[in-house]
Image (tube, grey):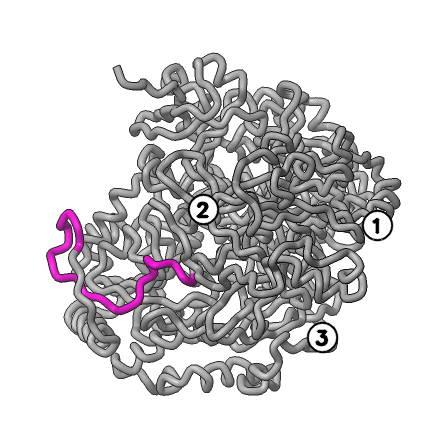
Amino acid sequence: MQKGFYIDTSICMGCYTCMAACKNWNSIAPQVTAEPGTQGPKWRRVMAVESGIYPDARIVNVSLSCMHCGKPACMDVCPVGAIRKRAEDGIVIVDRKRCIGCHSCADACPFGVPQYGEDGTMQKCNYCLDRIGKGQEPACVESCPPKALLAGTMEELSELAGNKAARRLVAASDPSVMIAR
Amino acid sequence: MKHKEIIPGRKLDRRTFLKTSGMLGAAGMSVLPGLSNVRAMENEIAVGEEIRRSICDMCCIGRCGIEVLVKDGRATRVQPFKDYPRGPICVKGNSILFQLYHPDRLKHPMKRTNPKGSVRAAWQRISWDEALDTIAEKLDGIRRKYGPEKVLFYAGDPKDAVRPNLQRMALKFGSPNYGTESSVCHRATVLATSLNGSGSAGLTPDTKAVIIWAHNPAWAMPCEMEELIRAKERGVKIIDVDPRQAPTTKLADIHLQLRPGSDGALALGMSRVIINEGLYDEDFIINWSHGFEEFRDYVQQFTPEKVENITGVAADKLVAAARMYAGNKPTGWITSAASTVHHWNGCQNHRAISAMTALTGAVSVPGIEPSVPPLTFRDITEWQTLLPPLRDKRADLKDFPVWEQFVQEIQINRLPEYVAEDILRAGLFVGCNYRMWPQDHLYSKAISDMEFTAGADFWLTPTMELMDIVLPAATSLERLGPIAIAGRTVFLPQPVVSPIGEARGDMEWMWDLAKHMGMGADFWNGDVRATLDWQLEPLGIKAADLMKEPKGRVIPPDKPQEGKPGFKTPSGKFELKSAVLEKAGFDGLPTYREPPEGPVAAPHTVEKFPLIFNTGSREPMYTHSRHRNNPRLRELQPDPKVDINPKDAEARGIKQGEDAVVETPAGSITVKANITNLAQPGVVHVYHGWPQADVNTILARTLDPISGFPAFKSQLCQVRKALTDL
């Protein structure tokens, strides 16, 4: 049963709570350097996408992390087999002990998911396995103030999506993400 | 500069079981999913992490419940406190541990060792006893020599944690001159609705149309968003009034994107439609309003076309919004604490909005139906008996006579004058940021010029650098109390970890200071728990009992109380024409006037400074000037910025992320350009609270004559590309 995320962009407010909750739960060290715009590793990202011009401009906020793809491009290119897709829930995980930090996965991932911290090894969303193992939601989902971000199996999320005309994100790697507009 | 490992917390521990994920076969995992999942990953729950509960103090209004995971006495992670009525914690709450464990926290009391006005203050660590003795001696000396009213008791951002306690201290000391940062926040909106008679209904389960006026809870108060989204889902009509296309705007059925500061004209224009089309609540207007005829006549000049000229909101949109709002009763009104009143005509603008909502019946008559009083505990300030005898010594008495009638704390915005005129000589500052006022150098000078000042804070901020003595304050995670109420839940936060260094809770050190000043008898001899018991007595709970209830106690509502119907106004009615304002020499009607520094009233200025300069709105990761030193938040927005429309940026040759200079007649600051449709053409939004690009250095010091609030949001500026190295 492939697990994935559902993001309702009609109510995502770009408040960054999911991003901070992710870093908080997973103890990801922040980095603020003298170099403008430098950021620590981001397992989840919040973006604003703008289209059109005033007065008909549209601003959409969206929160994305690892898509836990059906056919993970990152996994195929890893030379040391550090990336694995779990059979029972399709969650893509990385073994940082084995990773050699070659960035092949970063080149292959169509979504720019792989991140590298101080130790140079790849890190990314692991769907808060420690939490879901205890029946909890991933930290990002639990923290979302407007409940725009949901987690579940793709079947469960597709059912939800019915009401909101949400679509599964389409890409060659078959990402496990539903997006409602 | 790197901030690494501020929270050592949990080190990644891969131990024996995590050689490779491949070693754990899929079959094994399906047998023991919980355990194997935990083992497979590096972020397993640390053994012995214990959940403790408190209140988040990362913003000034949220007071959301927070759960802190603690291991070996050290906070490691946080999560939402789900059973608490206020929450969930936002991006700031999720970053609270970087505040708690920041290496720059003030850890010990310190005294200044070089004269004030030195380029850099020099400090020496002292004991709490020495610090409190010195403060007591100095303040008492000034009391004896010049009078107790010469001492200012000031509270900054921590809000309810400290304020009532400090006001009690001021009043018992004999000074009515207790002031807070609410002299620029919230009080003016309450003042405006109090002048009218009452605030309006917010969003209730029955609301059919709600107007969100100059408020973006998506970023300012994410904990309010879910309620709003659920309202949208059940078909509540939403009208959003905001100069920006803010995230909250996406919920709107109609967005009225007005010029900042023109709110009054828009509200009066909507009122005209509602009155002339007979959409108003006739029963309320006939029985419970005062001045309707004059109000009706006054609004006639605000035709949709004229309002379009003033506000930039299309005439047909205004009419549609007025019809949608008044046509879907019951109506509600959600507004920000201060956006509408950060204008020279702010108080009257806010009254005009209040009046418009009242026309649609959004105001209920106090006492007309039995009502359940909100849950509350005993007021520690005792201002009702202690303040009236001291009233004549209020510093603000002559400057802000209307404010003085309604607000139990002084309007402090003329601090520079009060110090220069020797009305205030010394101050105790529990949190303070002199940079919050336009022309802020006047305020830093005033604080510096005082004979004696002491302050308490988490940090040695630029304002604390001006003090003679600084005290290390404990954060909400390190202290007992204050009592928190959310809905019907009463909760007593307890320290989840020991304080950093010698930091102490504000109530604790203040009560100790009272003892040092010989006022122990009025402060339960310094016993904080005894004080809490006294405050909780009406609820029939002892502090010790409440401390055993980690999720707080739910107090069932009392029987509804009968009241005498009527408003607390001279007429006893909702005053569309205010008798109090008229008596004080202001317009009784909520008249619209152009901002003196605005494009209409200052045509010569607008030639050189053609853009409307809006400041003061919030970003999700910061609370005013706070959190720039919080690495988890700073990495989300590393630089000060101006939001500018693509059209205005293109006309100036400015590209995304480039340095841009924001210039006013008072000076200039350099910020990063953020080119976005969030800003409409002709209006730029510059974010406040950045020391290296402080908007208050270039804003004119223009105060609303009624409320004394500064005009942060409707002045003029020019933006140009920054010159690079020549």
Which class describes the residues within 10 Å of circle 3: few (<14), some (14-19), or many (20+)? few
Which class describes the residues within 10 Å of circle 1: few (<14), some (14-19), or many (20+)? few
Is B724 placed left or right of B451 in the picture? Answer: right
Please report whichever mark, 1 or 2, sits nearer to the chain's N-terminal start: 1
Residue B336 percent location from the top left of the image: 57, 46
Residue B651 percent location from the top left of the image: 47, 12
- Relative to the observer, which residue lies in front, B187 or B269? B187
Residue at mark 1: A1
Residue at mark 2: A118
Range shown magenta = B100-121
Asked whether residue B154 is in view, the answer is no
Q: Look at label 3 and name its amino acid.
A: Pro
Is A85 placed left or right of B569 in the picture? Answer: right
Question: Which of the image's four quarters has the N terminus of chain B?
Answer: top left
Magenta-colored stretch includes residue A41: no
Is B24 placed left or right of B590 in the picture? Answer: right
Is B15 placed left or right of A6 in the picture? Answer: left
